[in-house]
Image: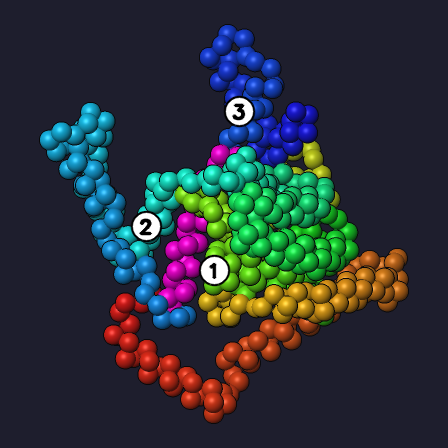
Amino acid sequence: MLPLYDWLMHAPWGVWIIDLIQTVLGWVWLHPSDHTLALLIGASIPVVVVFFLIQAVAGGSTYIERKVAADIQRRVGPNQCNPSNFLGAVFAEAVARGQAAGASKGHQFFAKLAAPLVPVFKLLDAILGRIAPGLLIFLADGIKLIMKEDLVPSAADKPMFKLAPAIVLASAFAALAALPYSDGFYVADFNIGVFYIAAITSIEAIGILMAGWASNNKWALLGGMRSAAQIVSYEIPVGLALLTGIILSGTMSMQGMIHQQYGFEGVGWSQGWWWNWNVFASPFMLLLFPVYYLAGLAECNRTPFDIPEAESELVAGYHTEYSGMRFAFFFMAEYAMMCVVSAIAVTIFLGGWSTGIGPLENWMMVAKPGQLIPGTETVAAAPVFGWLGGLVHLVAFLVKTYLLVFVMMWIRWTLPRFRVDQMMTLCWKKLIPLSLACMTGASLWMLVRPWIVSQENPEALGNLTALISMVLSLAIGGFLFWWFFLKKLSPDEQRERKLLVEANISAQGGKGFA
């Protein structure tokens, strides 16, 4: 219990929760309990909240992915799946069954409770049908999975079969504890946060192997073995990318990495700007970012790396024998892992919760490092922001993270699936050598910097580093602007765009698609 106690007591909200629970216990019992019971209750509250948050994120992501798939591949989207008649129809049907002759007492009781809610849910359906047609389709998926029968093969290893989905979900679930959502909103800032995330997410391979083996199905076993080989292989470039980020930041704390990218090296004119982010620290980091992202995509078993669950070859892979909520756990873990991989990329390469706008960051800052925090006698070791800054940083972190998740969805519905040999060749012959070269180059850069400018003048050293990063970031931004807005299309590209425009015009006026 001691590590959990320390973790909770050092969390930003932990002490407040413990005090509140002990106060409530003092009201219920004349003598409040010791810290153990309060600790257990206090630790369970954020766990339950985050668990339901994962379900909401996974459900919302399925809706967004359906929209992306429909837009990219011109498929029927969720806006055509009875979007304005869902909750109202469900509750109206439940009320009708409860009021029918011969209905059980339970149905009659539920009908009495649900009858006043039917108009409210019909109004909600109408509003959501206007704002986001088909938004509640993920709720229908959840109800369907809950109601489906939980089947366990008779020849399966039942304890291992039942435990495997929980281990896979727990791997992604536990990684959320170390993510730096904002400067003042996070679960815990471990001093070995990067190492913790790398260790806890690797447990996913064990759960997948357990699922394949316990199913007693050769196709499931083959899918589990493929997945284990894929995850273990692609963990190498991911680990090298994380190690390179540690070398540049000089810390394994996720919050410490973001503070390092804030630009506090005596460089007043560049603090808080986007060119301080690690992705612009050197050309090596710019190359390492897509290497990490591709390897992280493979860690999530997403297309084009979804060989372990390729339906055409493996009958859904390692989860062939699963149904109901156990089946849903695997995909909740997939979407949670997508968010974790993207959040790590944002933290290590894209400045974390920093907006990248210097004047805005300086305006929101309450105290700089080395200054007294207003209202206290504590000297700030890192930049301190008020409640407004914390809220803005939370929004910035979530937007950056979900933009990378969106790119994962975009890739899924654009690229075909790799063959097994192509997938392993890409990892061992391309990504691992590239990540090793980038780590070596970034390490040499960190050694050369003190030689360029004397160590007795850290402000000049910081100015030079910021200047190089600024020039590199502006060059990349200018190239991307030219590529997307100013570059002239080739004749073939002009012909393809014309055909797409004609197809869009003739496709039922756009109706029937997301």
Q: Secondary structure at mark 2?
A: loop
Q: Secondary structure at mark 1?
A: helix
Mark 3 and mark 1: Cα distance apart in space: 43 Å
Is disc 3 in contact with disc 2, using a CB cutoff of under 8 Å?
A: no
Residue 345, disc? none
Which residue does the image show at 42% across and 85% down from the upper left? 496
Is disc 3 in contact with disc 1, using a CB cutoff of under 8 Å?
A: no
Is 390 included in the stretch rendered in magenta? no
**Which stretch did the figure color magenta?**
47-71
Mark 2 and mark 1: Cα distance apart in space: 27 Å
* Nearer to the camera, 308 or 508: 308
Disc 3 designates what residue? 41
Q: Relative to residue 306, is residue 100 depicted above or below?
A: above
Is 70 included in the stretch rendered in magenta? yes
Lateral position of residue 72 relative to residue 82, left or right: right
Disc 2 designates what residue? 136
Which residue does the image show at 32% across and 47% down from the upper left? 140
Q: Earlier in the sequence, mark 3 or mark 2?
A: 3
What percent of the width, then of the height, locates residue 202? 65, 47
Residue 311, disc? 1
- Few, some or many residues within 10 Å of mark 1 (<14, 14–19, 20+): few
What percent of the width, then of the height, locates residue 241? 71, 59
